[in-house]
Image: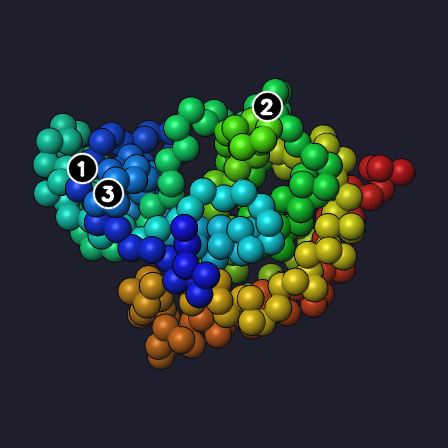
Amino acid sequence: MTSASGVLRTVTAVRYVTPLRSGGSVPGVVEADDLGTYVVKFTGSAQGRKALVAEVIVGELARRLGLRVPELVLVHFDPEVASQEPHQEVQDLLWASAGLNLGMDFLPGAADFTGAGVDVEPAEAARIVWLDAFTANVDRTTHSPNLMAWPTSGHQRPRLWLIDHGAALVFHHRWDTAAEAAGRAYDFRHHALGHHRPDVAAADAELAPRVTVGLLREVVAAVPDAWLVGEPGFAAPEEVRDAYVGHLAARARESGRWLPAAFAAREA
């Protein structure tokens, strides 16, 4: 399990199983020295380190807010463990990713969410929409839901698990405009859970007060220094962490500026 202090467990890849080509980043299924199997996203992908930073911050925040996210771990990866991979473009990616990468616990038997055969409680749908609005996640749409349907103990039907948050936190691609982006309304029109008529106002009343500076510092602390060093405009990783905390704390205080209020209108 993830450390209660916010620091992710670290494992070492011992076998590269297969690449996953369903997304542009070409993650890979990897076996590690803790006997676990993980879907690993690599620092050498076109999306780069910031996608992994977003994965950690949003995934760990979601977990602490009570949503289901597969465990995240840091994965030491030596490209030699994938020397038998036959595709040159995958080999190039792996050799560019030597060192620390991000793994997500592989969910055996999980299926992509299609909207059918899954227990989706309205309150849970609202919390997910709220999280996506809060973190400006542009990639949980009807065409790319980034939700998995996987059985949970005590439930006969699969339940939702959240994956793939690398496209969230869009503000960190241009820190000079982050303050302006903080008040931008979230465009929910094609959200994967929009048809569940989520009460995002109720979710906001429940979740926003829980997003404290202390919680944000704990979540951001899970991001390795190596993924923050060299950020333009910042002298050290701790300055970058402070910028994430400051931006997200302000956003939590000012939810009226970005909440998708039209959901409430649709209810009426």
Secondary element under disc 2, as helix, strand or loop, is loop
Q: In the picture shown, does residue 87 fall above or below 259?
A: above
Camera-side residue of 267 and 105:
105
Secondary element under disc 1, as helix, strand or loop, is strand
What residue type is disc 2 on?
A: Gln
Q: CA distance from mark 2 to mark 3?
A: 30 Å
State which tag comes first along the sequence, 2 or 3. 3
Report whether 208 appears left or right of 149.
right
Query: Badge 1 is on which residue?
Result: 15
For label 2, the crowd category at 10 Å Cα-Cα, with few meaning under 14, some 14 to 19 and many 20 or more, is few
Q: Where residue 113 sits: x, y (%)?
A: 54, 27
Q: CA distance from mark 1 to mark 3?
A: 7 Å
Mark drawn on residue 71:
none
Q: Where residue 243 sits: x, y (%)?
A: 49, 72
Query: Badge 2 is on which residue?
Result: 156
Report whether 186 appears left or right of 92.
right
Query: Badge 3 is on which residue?
Result: 32
Residue most extreme to the front: 154
Q: Are marks 2 and 1 in contact (CB under 8 Å)?
A: no
